[in-house]
Image: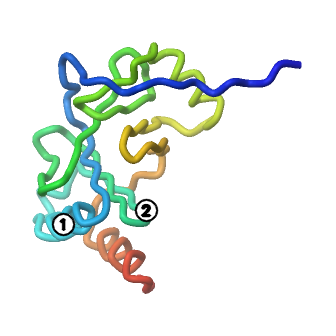
Amino acid sequence: MSAVVPLEWRWRPRAEPLPARAAVAWGTAAGALHARLLQLVPEQQAGLSAMAGPELLVVTGETDALPWVDGIAYAGPATDAPGLWLPTIEEPGLALDLIARSLQREHPKRQPLLLWSRPAFVLPLDRLLPLSPALLARIGAHWSGGRA
């Protein structure tokens, strides 16, 4: 039986940026994005979804509806690999279908997958929730160590 060798690649600038469908923020930028989302009126929150982790906030929606704060980055679905989301301005230097198949084996039944360059991570986006004041309160409470 042969051992499975992990795929290795480097990131490179994308010749043509992907349309942004997700805002991705870490650390201070995540806190600033959270504060910006709290300022949105319900009509602006409609159509946006979010998920959070420790010092991470991801918001998805239509390009024109995504908020901006200093330090934020954007992602979008890869046109050549359904179910794979990538940074809008970078791409792996390896065929996307190979990467997508490898990631699907590692994360069965978890689609779509956000593949990020720095910090390097893979994040399933199948647990996004509609943006609401209640969700934002839960995220804030989670970050501060409380309960909501």
Please state which of residues 5 and 73 is positioned toward the viewer in this rendering.
5
- Please give left or right for residue 148 compared with residue 130 in the image: right
In the image, residue 57 above or below residue 115: below
State the image coordinates of residue 101 (x, y, percent, origin top left): 57, 21
Q: Between marks 1 and 2, how big is the CA–CA gap?
A: 15 Å
Amino acid under label 2? Answer: Gly
**Image point (16%, 47%), residue name:** 66
* Residue indicated by mark 1: 32
- Please give left or right for residue 68 compared with residue 99 in the image: left
Name of the residue lying farthest toward the right: 1
In which image quadrant can residue 116 be found?
top left
Crowding at dot 2, Cα within 10 Å, few <14 / some 14-19 / many 20+, comes out as few
In the image, residue 13 above or below residue 136: above
State the image coordinates of residue 38 (x, y, percent, origin top left): 18, 70
**Image point (79%, 24%), residue name:** 3
Amino acid under label 1? Answer: Ala
| SS label for mark 1 | helix
* Residue indicated by mark 2: 53
State the image coordinates of residue 50 (x, y, percent, origin top left): 33, 55
